[in-house]
């Protein structure tokens, strides 16, 4: 009995700890993803008419950019509702 | 002109002449068929024509291989089609050209002189500018990438590893493939730029005695100055008795812009009149002017 209460409390506190850590890094994660998005956009900018580096640079780095491309796609999809996106980041309901 | 200079140099030195012009005629001049690889013409003279189309294709194939080995699951997609379109995108040909110059300089150390016969002004300036443009972009991308890695590291330090199943993205500069690739590219281009701007490299500008050629040469000189490439010799080509006056005018205007040694190469009338002899009268000591 005593053991299960202890493990229950341990679970509660570790969950609480994890949620606090998640809160602390939430904004940094958004910031990182934004930077990754910019990185991909800079590299592949020629596709949307932005000044871009020589094409071969994109070709050279393409094999290592899976995550950045996923973010770029997601950002493009969500770009229609940037206000909602920002509200989500700030925690405004 | 480049072929004639190579021939003359090969009397005393080991020479490799590489034609980068898509409209090749090096093989025609020497009366041999060159197939995108180095061919021996004499013991001291080797010839090579660069096939741009083939080079671009080889380069893209290498990238497809890297891509396929990185993401096995992408093999189900038809990547070849995507890359065949990429082949026509701007920049690939220039890159292929530059890569071939870099490779030639790196691998052909046994020659005393390597002569590159370049295509017309526009393309030449574009590929000569490529190392500098690339370094600027690579620097900027490295900066952003390092910030991304710093943020990832912060996230990792705060969150730790939440579960064993979670993929931890690289946060260390030594582990990040993108940053490693960017740094390698920067190192290669800086090395190439150092060679191209260095003491052992000379750019020779060949122009014809006419006003159009003068304008083009002026643009080329401006471009070379911007890029800090060492223009060391001017050659006024195909000067005859008839165009001597224009030749003098063109030479004066060009030398007002850039005061470097100038050689005048006359077009021999004898050959035109079907009397045999040399087509160009190239001075024996042309290389001493570089």
Image: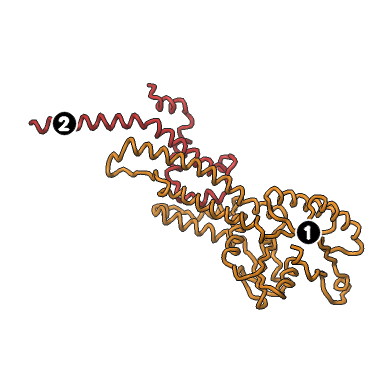
Circle nearer the viewer, 2 or 1 = 1
Q: Which chain is orange?
A: B
Color encoding of the figure = by chain
**Residue A37 x/y as whole percent:** 47, 38
Q: Chain of mark 1?
A: B
Q: Which chain is red?
A: A
Vertical order, A2 against B247 (above or below):
above
Q: Mark 2 sits on what residue?
A: A8
Q: Chain of mark 2?
A: A
Which of the labelled discs sits on residue B234, or is there none? 1
Side (left or right) of B208 relative to B245: left
- Quadrant where the image shows the C terminus of chain B: bottom right
- Quadrant where the image shows the N terminus of chain B: bottom right
Residue drawn at point x = 59 percent, y = 68 percent: B109
Vertical order, B204 against B42 (above or below):
above
Residue B167: which quarter of the image? top left
- The residue closer to the viewer here, B23 or B9, is B9
């Amino acid at each position: 009995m005593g053991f299960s209460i202890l493990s229950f409390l341990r679970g509660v506190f570790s969950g609480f700890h994890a949620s606090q850590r998640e809160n602390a890094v939430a904004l940094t994660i958004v910031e990182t993803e934004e930077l990754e998005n910019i990185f991909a956009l800079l590299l592949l900018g020629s596709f949307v008419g932005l000044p871009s580096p020589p094409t071969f640079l994109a070709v050279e780095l393409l094999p290592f950019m899976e995550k950045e491309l996923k973010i770029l796609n997601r950002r493009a999809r969500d770009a229609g509702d940037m206000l909602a996106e920002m509200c989500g980041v700030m925690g405004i309901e | 002109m480049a072929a004639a200079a190579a021939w003359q140099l090969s009397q005393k030195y080991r020479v490799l002449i590489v034609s980068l012009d898509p409209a090749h005629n090096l093989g025609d001049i020497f009366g041999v068929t060159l197939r995108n690889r180095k061919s021996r013409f004499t013991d001291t003279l080797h010839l090579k024509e660069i096939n741009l189309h083939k080079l671009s294709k080889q380069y893209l194939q290498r990238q497809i291989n890297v891509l396929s080995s990185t993401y096995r699951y992408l093999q189900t997609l038809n990547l070849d089609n995507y890359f065949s379109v990429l082949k026509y995108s701007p920049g690939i040909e220039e890159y292929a050209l530059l890569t071939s110059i870099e490779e030639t300089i790196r691998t052909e150390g046994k020659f005393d002189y390597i002569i590159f016969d370049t295509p017309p002004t526009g393309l030449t300036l574009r590929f000569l500018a490529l190392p500098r443009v690339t370094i600027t972009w690579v620097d900027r991308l490295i900066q952003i990438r390092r910030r991304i890695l710093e943020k990832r590291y912060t996230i990792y330090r705060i969150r730790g590893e939440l579960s064993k199943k979670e993929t931890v993205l690289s946060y260390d500069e030594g582990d990040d493939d993108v940053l490693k690739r960017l740094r390698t590219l920067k190192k290669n281009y800086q090395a190439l730029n150092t060679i191209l701007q260095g003491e052992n490299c000379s750019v020779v500008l060949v122009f014809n005695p006419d006003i159009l050629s003068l304008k083009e040469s002026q643009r080329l000189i401006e471009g070379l100055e911007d890029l800090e490439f060492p223009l060391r010799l001017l050659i006024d080509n195909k000067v005859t008795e008839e165009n001597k006056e224009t030749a003098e005018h063109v030479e004066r205007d060009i030398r007002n812009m850039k005061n470097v040694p100038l050689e005048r190469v006359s077009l021999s009338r004898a050959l035109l009149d079907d009397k045999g002899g040399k087509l160009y009268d190239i001075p024996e000591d042309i290389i001493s002017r570089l």
